[in-house]
């Protein structure tokens, strides 16, 4: 029965991204299970939006009820985060600290056209390393507190490995991740950040505009981030689908160039394959030729689908380690990951890093 529910959910998402009619849900054995699975996978609000185009008589009340609650909660959460993004943007601008907002509700607005369709637990902000202290001062002045209470040398080592730092409001309602790079140290080489600002683009958030990454930068970055987490949520595949639909005229040469800089070409191929074959997102023949055939990508895609609805698959450390290792196409990148991961796991207990 679970496999039937999974197949229904995937079929619904495929139909949504292809602009087709959604499959008949009246014969579904476990309608509540479908709705709950969609919520667990981060696509509850998106499925509810898709079902609004279906006559009410063709949607079981149990599905509509569960998804409506999810959608209303997503609207409230997104509204809170959008207001906070506006407040943060104003504060950073007044302090003269250049920042870029990405993922979360900003990605929801940019790619989906609605922040509520892309659930997020935090607000991700990129800042140049030399401006990190100034950016942190802005957050602390706004009432945020450090979520990792390290000091001195331990704090510097933590930032070196993680390349980010989390902050929370005292009521725990809002969380900000301040990023010094696009990924932790062991996942991608540190690149100069200034070029990210050169290609940045504005996105409207309510009555304001905030700056975010260009789609040619964002797409490989999303694939890198998702590969880091073994693509364990349908939400991340839908991010790729939404971005491809929102920006059909991407500069693919520049996009592949960014992936090469981050040693994440195979991760990009995997993300495109999952969106193309799993969600039915069309890709131009030139893009498919650029992807080529990679046997390890085929194997990684099978592992993703095997583990998508079975979190226990990824609990063993060695399963995650092998996935990350095989996600890198060059021997030097693999050795880099092995060496830095060995060092990372040696100091992880001292730094209090949970993932």
Image (cartoon, helix red, strand yellow):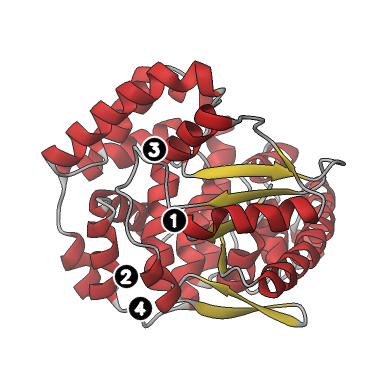
Q: In this view, does 65 lie to the left or right of 338?
A: right
How far apart, in angstroms, are the residues tagged by discs 1 and 2? 17 Å
Residue at the disc numbered 2: 283
Q: Position of residue 283 (x, y in %)?
A: 32, 70
Q: Where is residue 270 in the image (x, y as percent from the top left)?
A: 31, 50
Labels 4, 2: front one:
4
Q: Is residue 20 left or right of residue 88?
A: left
| For residue 147, above or below residue 214 | above
Which residue sits at x=69%, y=36%?
147
CB atoms of marks 2 and 3 within 8 Å: no
The kind of secondary structure element at disc 3 is helix
The kind of secondary structure element at disc 4 is loop
Residue at the disc numbered 1: 222
Relative to the observer, which residue lies in front, 189 or 205?
189
Which residue sits at x=31%, y=32%?
323
Question: In the figure, residue 258 lies in which quadrant?
Answer: bottom left
């Amino acid at each position: 029965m679970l496999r039937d529910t999974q197949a229904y959910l995937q079929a619904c998402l495929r139909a949504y991204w292809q602009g087709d009619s959604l499959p008949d849900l009246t014969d579904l054995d476990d309608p509540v299970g479908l709705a709950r699975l969609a919520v667990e996978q981060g696509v509850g609000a998106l499925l509810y939006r898709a079902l609004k185009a279906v006559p009410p008589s063709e949607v079981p009340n149990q599905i509509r009820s569960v998804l409506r609650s999810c959608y209303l909660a997503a609207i409230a959460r997104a509204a809170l985060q959008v207001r906070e993004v506006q407040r943060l943007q104003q504060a950073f601008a007044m302090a003269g600290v250049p920042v870029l907002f990405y993922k979360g509700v900003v990605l929801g607005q940019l790619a989906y056209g609605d922040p509520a369709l892309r659930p997020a637990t935090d607000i991700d902000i990129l800042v140049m390393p030399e401006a990190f202290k100034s950016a942190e001062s802005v957050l602390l002045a706004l009432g945020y507190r450090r979520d990792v209470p390290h000091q001195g040398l331990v704090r510097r080592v933590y930032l070196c490995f993680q390349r980010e730092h989390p902050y929370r409001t005292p009521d725990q309602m809002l969380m900000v991740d301040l990023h010094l790079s696009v990924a932790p140290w062991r996942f991608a080489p540190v690149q100069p950040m200034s070029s990210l600002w050169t290609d940045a683009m504005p996105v409207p958030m309510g009555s304001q505009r905030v700056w975010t990454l260009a789609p040619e930068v964002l797409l490989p970055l999303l694939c890198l981030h998702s590969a880091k987490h073994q693509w364990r949520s349908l939400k991340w595949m839908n991010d790729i689908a939404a971005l491809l639909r929102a920006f059909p005229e991407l500069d693919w040469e520049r996009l592949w160039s960014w992936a090469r800089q981050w040693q994440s070409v195979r991760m990009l191929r995997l993300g495109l394959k999952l969106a193309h074959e799993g969600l039915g997102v069309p890709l131009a023949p030139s893009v498919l030729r650029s992807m080529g055939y990679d046997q390890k990508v085929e194997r990684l895609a099978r592992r993703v689908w095997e583990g998508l609805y079975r979190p226990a698959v990824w609990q063993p450390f060695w399963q995650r380690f092998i996935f990350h290792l095989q996600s890198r196409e060059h021997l030097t990148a693999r050795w880099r990951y092995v060496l830095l991961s060995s060092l990372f796991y040696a100091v992880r207990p001292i730094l209090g890093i949970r993932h």
